[in-house]
Image: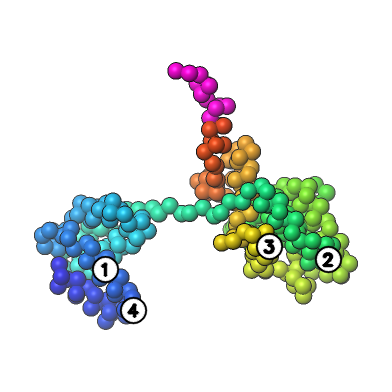
Amino acid sequence: MKDHLEGFLRYLDLQKGASEHTLRAYRKDLEAFAPYVTKGVEDIGMIDVRVFLAGQIKGGLSKTTAGRRLAAVRSFLKYLYREGYVKENPAKLVTTPKAQRPLPRFLSVDDVFSLVEQPKGMGFLQTRDRAILELLYSSGLRVSEIAGLNMEDVNTREGLVKVKGKGRKERVVPVGSKAVDAIKSYLVEKILLKRKNKALFLNNRGEPLSDRGVRRIVVKYARMIGISGKVGPHTLRHTFASHLLQAGADLRVIQELLGHSSLSTTQKYTHLDITHLMEVYDKAHPMADKEE
């Protein structure tokens, strides 16, 4: 296999213009595959590739790294097929292992209360920041949805917000009383400064606040209460969903509020500790409180 590997790397270098870093990565991945090729390359089968993949995961590699190595093997065998060394590419039917996507961080109720109380005073920026923080936690909106809100989208009397989500799909989301009060206070300041832009949230120049501007606001106040690490508007979106679920809300309802087209997407936002799970079990299962 060594000669074929060198030929493949030359092909990547001369015809594909691969970087030195890419060539080193391919070499490392394919050298890990070489011990699994016990005969000639023409005899490589799907079982060999699957055994290699399983061995990598069993050996402690993450699914992401194992998937990358499978991709390298797949490209190598595709090259061998094109050059006529093998009759087919047995790796193309091997499924790439799905890496578990880490969930965004999840704030406690106390942390959220401390966060939304940080913007002090009644000035334009202070009331705007508090309204944004309250609305993010109260509604679970995406950062782009917050930044895209117009004045006409907010109904403070009914406590509703009309949102344009992904794919321009519209949905109406209920908003809690504290968020409504925060928005009303902000609108007073906006009117006093004669900021007539149709966008709901504006920057200090009177222009629509960008996604990045919203992120900066969340990070700023999170740092003020000692929350370090990666945190942003999505943290509050995840916290919104998690707190609702812990309070007993139906997952389908949360799906609608978040604007997810698939329930499986909503499930990725849920995070329950074992104590809460046991409480639900004890209350719901008919045999939970009976001794065997």
- What type is the residue that disc 3 sits on? Met
Q: Which residue is mark 3?
A: 224
- What type is the residue that disc 1 sits on? Lys
x and y, in percent, of residue 192 in the image = 89, 67
Which circle's residue, 3 or 4, is located before the other in the chain? 4
Q: Which residue is mark 1?
A: 28
Which circle's residue, 2 or 1, is located before the other in the chain? 1
Which circle's residue, 2 or 4, is located before the other in the chain? 4
- Residue under the image location 58 percent in, 51 percent down: 106
- Tell me the tag on residue 123: 2
The label nearer to you, 3 versus 2, is 3
Look at the numbered disc 1 and give the secondary structure of its residue: helix
Q: How many marks?
A: 4
Look at the numbered disc 2 and give the secondary structure of its residue: loop
Distance from the alpha carbon under mark 2 to that under mark 1: 59 Å
Residue 234, located in which quarter of the rendered image?
bottom right
Distance from the alpha carbon under mark 4 to that under mark 1: 14 Å
